[in-house]
Image (cartoon, grey):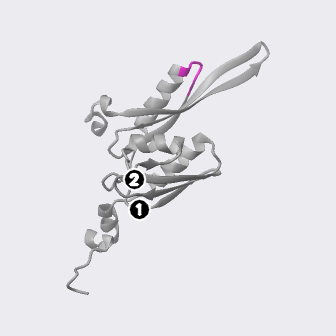
């Protein structure tokens, strides 16, 4: 609980991915409500995605934003990109995310681009395959980012040093 309060709320960047109007047909007519998909992040490796529903657009966005900030995950970064290539899937949507060299920029479609901006990734290659539903594409991209592990974490899990994991070898040995 103390971790959530250590940083100020102004550091978060919120991006509205989609707003949908939902219609419920009742005996007396039609009842409209809205659902909003929001990604929130600190541009330093933390990101959260959530869906908010309400009778008004602004309160749906506010609900989604507060949910997204509560459900954040940590994404390991290597400079301005990710440590290695990764694939994610959600429903019929698949996303392939590849690390890129410095200066490449964000080469990704609309929904994945918004997610990468709030995470803080500046150089990335991403391709969305299968269903183009924005909600599922964002969840597939988040699934891919959640699979990433840092070199420090992998070295601890495997009981090896970071140099052994990365594959750095002495030139004198070979």
Q: Is residue 54 magenta?
A: yes
- The residue shown at (63%, 22%) is 33
**Is 49 displayed left or right of 82 in the figure?**
right
Highlighted magenta segment, given as a residue range: 53-57
- The residue shown at (47%, 54%) is 125
Q: Residue furthest front?
A: 103
**Helix, strand, or loop for circle 2?**
loop
Which of the 4 image quadrants contains residue 25?
Answer: top right
Residue 72 in sight in this render: no
**Helix, strand, or loop for circle 1?**
loop
Q: Earlier in the sequence, mark 1 or mark 2?
A: 1
- The residue shown at (38%, 48%) is 121
- Mark 1 Cα-neighbour bin, 10 Å: few <14, some 14–19, many ≥20: some
State which quarter of the image contains the N terminus: top left
Q: Residue furthest right?
A: 27
Marks 1, 2: nearer the viewer = 2
Query: Residue 104 has which mark?
Result: 2
**Is 45 displayed left or right of 137 in the figure?**
left
Which of the 4 image quadrants contains residue 157?
Answer: bottom left
């Amino acid at each position: 609980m103390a971790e959530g309060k250590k940083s100020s709320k102004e550091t978060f960047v919120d991006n509205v991915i989609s707003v949908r109007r939902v219609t419920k047909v009742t005996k007396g007519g039609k009842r409209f409500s809205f659902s909003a998909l929001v990604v929130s992040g600190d541009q330093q490796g933390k990101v959260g995605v959530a869906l908010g529903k309400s009778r008004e657009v602004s309160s749906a966005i506010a609900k989604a934003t507060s949910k997204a900030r509560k459900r954040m995950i940590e994404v390991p970064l290597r400079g301005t990109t990710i440590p290695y290539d990764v694939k994610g899937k959600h429903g019929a949507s698949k996303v392939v995310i590849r690390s890129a060299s410095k200066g490449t920029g964000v080469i990704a479609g609309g929904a994945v681009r918004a997610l990468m901006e709030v995470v803080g990734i500046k150089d990335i290659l991403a391709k969305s395959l299968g269903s183009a539903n924005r909600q599922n594409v964002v969840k597939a991209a988040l699934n891919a980012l959640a699979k990433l592990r840092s070199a420090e974490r992998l070295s601890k899990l495997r009981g090896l040093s970071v140099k052994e994991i990365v594959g750095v070898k002495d030139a004198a040995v070979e």
